[in-house]
Amino acid sequence: MIRWIVFLIFVAILEVYAFQAFKTLIKSKAFFVFYFITSAIALIYIVYQLTNFDRSVGQTPQTMMTFGLLLLLYVPKLLVTIILFSEDIFRFFAGIIGLFSKSSEPGFLPDRRKFVSQVALGVAAIPFASFIYGMLQGKYNFKVIKQTLYFSDLPQAFDGITITHISDIHSGSFDDAEKIQYAIDLINEQNSDMVLFTGDIVNTHATEMDPWIETFKGIHNPKFGKYSVLGNHDYGEYINWTSQQDKIQNFENIKAIHDKIDFKLLLNEHVKIKKDNQELAIVGVENWGRKFGERGDLNLASQGLRKEDFKIVLSHDPSHWDEKIQYDDNHYHLTLSGHTHGLQFGIEIPGWVKWSPVQYVYKQWAGLYENAGRYVYVNRGFGFHAYPGRVGIMPEITVIELKKREKVA
C-alpha cells in the first residue's frame, strides 16, 4: 500500500510541474480539459494493469503496453519537473534576495520564465517522440553489425570463417510476422559458415514459440551448423507455476524447441568443428549470471579440451565473461553473449557516443570487449522484452569474421 501512495505522490508532483509548463505557453481551457481527462484515463489504466498483474501468466501484450505507456507519459514529465524544479531553486533564492532589496515587485517568488518552460517542453519532446518511434518502428529496425577479429593461433583451415550471432529472441513479444521474416531473410543473406544463438528464445512459456517454429526453421543450415544455448528466461523462473511438474515440463519443451528449428542445443558441453584435419571448439554453457543464477559449468563443458585448442564460448550473460571466463587458465579465445539488450534504450553514434543506463550494471553491455587477447562480443538482442520498443539501441544481427594474424618473426 505504501508503495502505491509513494507512486501516486510522485505522479502528482510530475503532473503539477507539467501543468505549470503548459500553463505558461497555452491559454486554451479546452486543451487543459483534454489534457486532464487523458492523463487521468492513462493513470487509471496503468494502475489497473499493474495491480492486476497475474504472476501465473507473466508478461502479456497488455503488460508490455502498460510499461510502454508508463515510460511515454512520465519520463518526459520527469525531465520537465527536473528543469522547473531547478528554476524553483533559483526563484527561491531570488525571492530571499528580494526580501532584503528595495524591489517593489509583489509576491515572494519571481514569475516563471516562459523561456524555461519552452526549454523544458522541448527537452521532454525528445524522449516522448523517441518512445513512440521505438514502439512503432524501432523494435523491428534490425541492424547487421560486422566485426573482424584476428588471432595468431587460429587454425589455418578456419582463416576467414564467418559466424552469424543472434541472441535474445523473446518470441512471446512478437506481433509482426512480416518484420520477423524480414529479419530471418537478413540472417540468411549473410551466408555465414555458422549460426550461433545465445539464449532467451522465449519470455517464459514454450508455447510462445509455436507460431514462429517454421519461421526460425527457415534459417539456412550453414556449412558448420547451427548451435545454441539457454538464457535466463528459458528456465521459467519469473512466474508462479501451478505445480513444479508444469515448470519442469515447460523447461523440457523449451529445450525441444531448439531441435525443432534445427539448432543443436549445447548444455554444458562442446562440439568440435573440423576442416582439413584441423578443428575448433564451440563450448556451450547453461546460463551463468551474477544476478540470474549460476547453472553454467565451464569446466564440464570443456572436458577433453586443451589450453591450446581454439575455443568459442556461448554464454548468455556477459557477467560470466567478466567474472570468470576472461581469467580462466584454459584460455577461451572468443565468448559470445547477449542478455543486456542494451536496455533497449540509449544513444549510439559509431565513433562518437555509446551510452545506455545498462552500462552502470554491466561492464560489457553491447559490442566488442577485449582483455589480454580474449574477447567477448555482446549482442544487443534480436527481440524485445518489457518495454515494447527500442530507442537508440536497435535489434542486432552480428556477423563475425575470424582471421589468422601472422606471427611477427
Image (cartoon, rainbow, N blue to C red):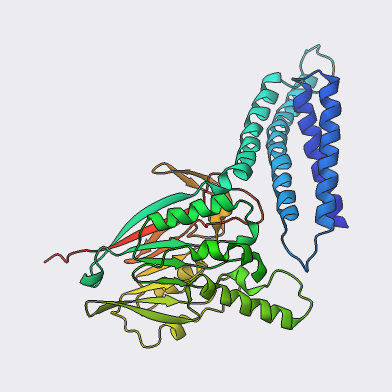
Q: Nearer the viewer, residue 73 or 91?
A: 73
**Image x and y of residue 299, in percent:** 44, 84
**Image x and y of residue 128, in percent:** 66, 37
Residue 277 can be seen, yes or no:
yes
**Image x and y of residue 376, in percent:** 41, 64
Residue 153 can be seen, yes or no:
no
Give the residue furthest to the bottom.
304
Mark count: 0
Is 184 rendered above or below residue 289? above
**Image x and y of residue 146, in percent:** 36, 53
Give the residue furthest to the left.
409
Q: Nearer the viewer, residue 407 or 265?
A: 265
Q: Residue at x 45, y 54 (%)?
A: 185
* Quadrant in the rendering for residue 295: bottom right
Which quadrant does the N terminus fall into?
A: bottom right
Which quadrant does the C terminus fall into?
A: bottom left
Is 294 rendered above or below residue 1? below
Q: Residue at x 70, y 33 (%)?
A: 80
Is 378 rendered above or below residue 284? above
Left or right: 16 as drawn, with respect to 353: right
Is 280 rendered above or below residue 181? below
